[in-house]
Amino acid sequence: MRNDMRRLIVLTAAGLLSACGGGGSPAPISQDTVSTPLAKLALKTFAADCSDFLVYTTDALTEQYLTRYYCFADGPCPVFAADSADTASEMTPPPSPQRVSATNAQESGVDEADVVRADNAGRLYILSDHQLHALAAFPPQGLEQRPVISVDLAADDPAFHADDFYLDEAAGRLVVLGARYDDGGAQAVAVMLDVHDPQAPPTETARVSVDGYSLQTRRIGSRIHRVSRFDVPLPAWFYDGADELARLRQNYFDAIARGDDGTVAAVKSEVRSEIGRRVDAAEPNDFLPRVREQFAGGAQQQSWLSCAAISHPDVTTALGLAVIDSFDTDGSDHAAAGVVNNAYQVYASAANLYLAQSSFGWFFDPQQVDQTVVYRLALPASGPAAYQALALVDGSLNNAYQMSEYQGMLRMATTQSDRDGGTRNHVTVLDAGAAERMPVIGQLRDLAPGETIQGARFVGDRGYVVTYQRIDPLFALDLSDPAGPRVADTLKLPGFSSYLMPLGDNYLLTIGRAGDDQQLTGEVALQLFDVSNLEHIRQLSVITPAAGDGSYSYSPAEYDPHAFNYFADQPSAATPGTLAVPLQAYGGSDGSDFAGFLVVRVEPGTGTPLQETGRIDHAALTAQNDMCMGSSSGTSPMLCGDPVYAAQPRRSVFMQDDAGTYLYTISAVGLIASDALQPDVTLASRALPYDPPQCCVLDTATSP
């Protein structure tokens, strides 16, 4: 939630700064920029003996070392672009629901990891830090009496922290993805658990890892593909101000200041020669990530990623690898490939993986024009991902939803910034089936000059793009002709939408920030649009849930689609249905703060297309939590002192049978089951073990 809030603040600030620029025409794109030839960005593999890998490493370290604003004091500048088990008693298996909501994912057939899952039998799996909780949640009646099986995933490895997980229900397996940190650096870890027996604690069967930290994962069938970032460990001399290289670096900077090009070139050559000597004296493995596997009852196997498995462009980049390791949900067939790359966005279709890297990550030239190179890698049913082709487009991406593959075409929505503060927005259609280079098939350029893209969604032969400066233009795009994409209609509204969900072909449901004609107002906005006629889109309804005058509200669903849960009444029709989103609201008067879930009916054919039907309060669950009652392990002032913050609403799950539809809402402190059509009616609730941040635990045994 903190990371989501940070992203919200950054984007809101960006929007407000943009608004300060005034109206008028946007500044022209600066001509004092350089563009990188596409041929130099194409990937080629290193030799198996690592000789050319060491040459590339020397070039990259030289560029990094001679970059004035590289973070020498604190290491490399960050690359930006989250108990013993209880024993279950013997019991008759509870009945199963007829329908269960799934994780909200971008593409059909491509699963995404999340922190809450439900299987078709109505069993809930909930991940909270290093604790995995499992319980039979259906039916809601009697939920309080059913056992919760809790597994401490860090019991045998205190350095492990879990992030999210996949449930391979057909195979009876659960794969927890996370990270561990030790003196050797970060590792992206996957832990395989056997969950065949619903009455037994999950048991670990395998563990696979790779050096680095995970960026994104996707599951296609029984195979998981993980993209990690490996920052090559920089030698100690890189930061040693007393090293002879530090004197040369200062001479280099002084020569630049004097405009002495001859000395600049000579010193750079001397620095490169010395760095090359030091790199050659090292082992290639000093700069390569390790790949590990361990299966139940066996010893850990470790190897280094082969240089021959790493691809690189001719452009010298900051020294780091995007590592794509693929494995089955039982940990078998673990295969890895690497790309010298500073990719910050990852998108996957059912057949391909795309890595998007901004031009600011590949060149050490301040004049570099704002561009994105996207690499396409095939995702085979077995073995490693394989590089296929690349493309270069103007602008940058905010998230994976600004990319989508459809019928052999890759659509991208980008915002291009220039050095004078101007912006342009483009929609580009690429041939995703081409070998080596994906050519531009069609393009829309210069949408909403001076604004930036806040939300985008491509579905079928349609696209929707939201930009923002002061007013939110929603662009409806006709992409039926890939060579001639066009704007079918534009609707201008205050605020902006950050996540967009099409409901069939007729409606578009969105969440974002509310605003007026001048600025954002600090509230969540839910909107429903009629897009049945793409040439004439209409806003049907808007809701801005508040907690009183002057209130501020926030939902993780604004920037995390997994928190946005829409459940149609019938699987055969997109509407009507019910929407549940987590909500935290802080009001202008005492007692009006709220932390829980907002429940909204979506009925386009009625007089109230969007109607708030209730709120499910999770702040009250803090009073039931062991930590709040002062257990022997300590008390969390954050939890007990501010229940609205501590509750941290996260996810929701719908389950349905002939008797009705039930809504299960999950927060950091507990679980509440409600009637989905009457959410104010609580059917069951229970607190879950709360694991507060270590910085916030007060040891009652030693504190006054």
Image (cartoon, rainbow, N blue to C red):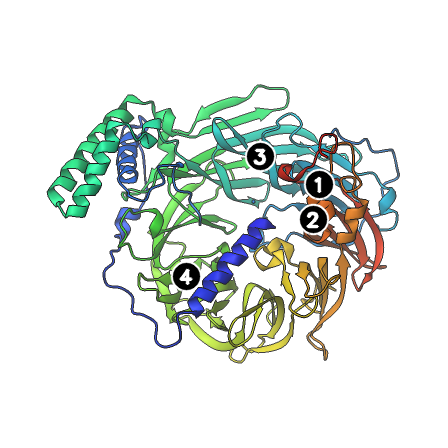
Upstream in the sequence, badge 4 or badge 2? 4
Q: Secondary structure at mark 1?
A: loop
Which amino acid does the dot numbered 2 rest on? Ala
Question: Which residue is pictured at 72% across the width and 78% down the height?
Answer: 606
**Are circles 4 and 1 on residues that touch, CB within 8 Å?**
no
Q: In the figure, is residue 90 to the left or right of 327?
A: right
Q: Secondary structure at mark 2?
A: helix
Front residue (pair 18, 320) = 18
Upstream in the sequence, badge 2 or badge 3? 3
Point out residue 2 in the picture as x, y percentages from the top left corner.
58, 49
Question: In the displayed image of the protein, which residue is found farthest to the left?
Answer: 262
Question: Which mark, by number, is residue 636?
Answer: 1
* Mark 1 surroundings within 10 Å by alpha-carbon count, few (fewer than 14), some (14 through 19), many (20 or more): many
Point out residue 157 in the picture as x, y percentages from the top left corner.
61, 27
**Residue at label 4?**
414
Which amino acid does the dot numbered 4 rest on? Thr
**Residue at label 2?**
646
Which amino acid does the dot numbered 1 rest on? Ser
Q: Nearer the viewer, mark 4 or mark 1?
A: 1
Q: Secondary structure at mark 3?
A: strand
Question: Which mark, by number, is residue 477?
Answer: none
**Are circles 2 and 1 on residues that touch, CB within 8 Å?**
yes
